[in-house]
Image (cartoon, rainbow, N blue to C red):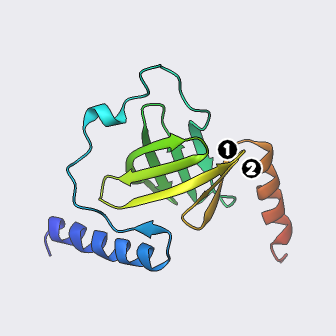
Amino acid sequence: MSGTNHRKAATVFLTAALTACGTETPPAPRSAPSATQARPPASGTVHPYVGMWVTADGYIRQELLPDGRYDEARGDRASAYTGRYEVTGGHIDYWDDSGFTADGRFDGDVLHHGGYLFYREGSAAHRQAVSQRASTRPSG
């Protein structure tokens, strides 16, 4: 299978799996985002959620960049998912470069997204989640 066909098949499989979970919506036919869509607001203000968000186990790391782009790493795979995002109040919408869309919501230093809890890296919420995770692991 060619690289292009392999990527298309992987995208179809991922979209179907995520849609079945009820956390993602299938991609709508649309053109690629323009460069203007990834720029920060004209006011120059940046929303308060820019930065690194991580799961308690550190496996998924999602960086919300000030230019309206995100870069998500999974395990040893850097830039596993990339795309653009928009924040409205405490709600975030994602448009992945591979075509799928997703959303989430912020609750202070906790991001609820795709069935996962992400924590602002280094925050009290992050330290507490890591500590709780460590204390619930079986010893030995």
Query: Residue 136, image x and y in percent?
Result: 83, 71
Q: Secondary structure at mark 2?
A: helix
At 28% from the left edge and 73% from the top edge, which residue is drawn? 12
- With respect to residue 17, does 68 lie above or below? above
Inter-mark Cα distance, 1 to 2: 6 Å
The circle on residue 126 is: 2
Q: Amino acid at mark 1?
A: Glu
Q: Say whether disc 1 or disc 2 marks the residue closer to the N-terminus.
A: 1
The circle on residue 90 is: none
Q: Is residue 103 left or right of residue 25?
A: right
- With respect to residue 104, does 138 lie above or below? below
At 60% from the left edge and 53% from the top edge, which residue is drawn? 105
Q: Secondary structure at mark 1?
A: loop
Return the residue nearer the eye: 32 or 91. Answer: 91
Give the class, few, some or many, for how many residues have Cα within 10 Å of label 1's Cα (few <14, many ≥20). many
At 16% from the left edge and 71% from the top edge, which residue is drawn? 5
Return the residue nearer the eye: 36 or 5. Answer: 36
Q: Is residue 113 left or right of residue 36?
A: right
Quarter holding the N terminus?
bottom left
Q: Residue furthest left?
A: 2
Quarter holding the C terminus?
bottom right
At 71% from the left edge and 45% from the top edge, which residue is drawn? 109
Q: Quadrant of residue 7?
A: bottom left
- With respect to residue 48, does 134 lie above or below? below
Task: Please say if the residues under marks 1 and 2 sit with CB atoms less than 8 Å apart.
Answer: yes
Q: Is residue 116 left or right of residue 69?
A: right
Q: Residue furthest front?
A: 89
Q: Amino acid at mark 2?
A: His
Label 1 belongs to which residue?
A: 121
Give the class, few, some or many, for how many residues have Cα within 10 Å of label 2's Cα (few <14, many ≥20). many
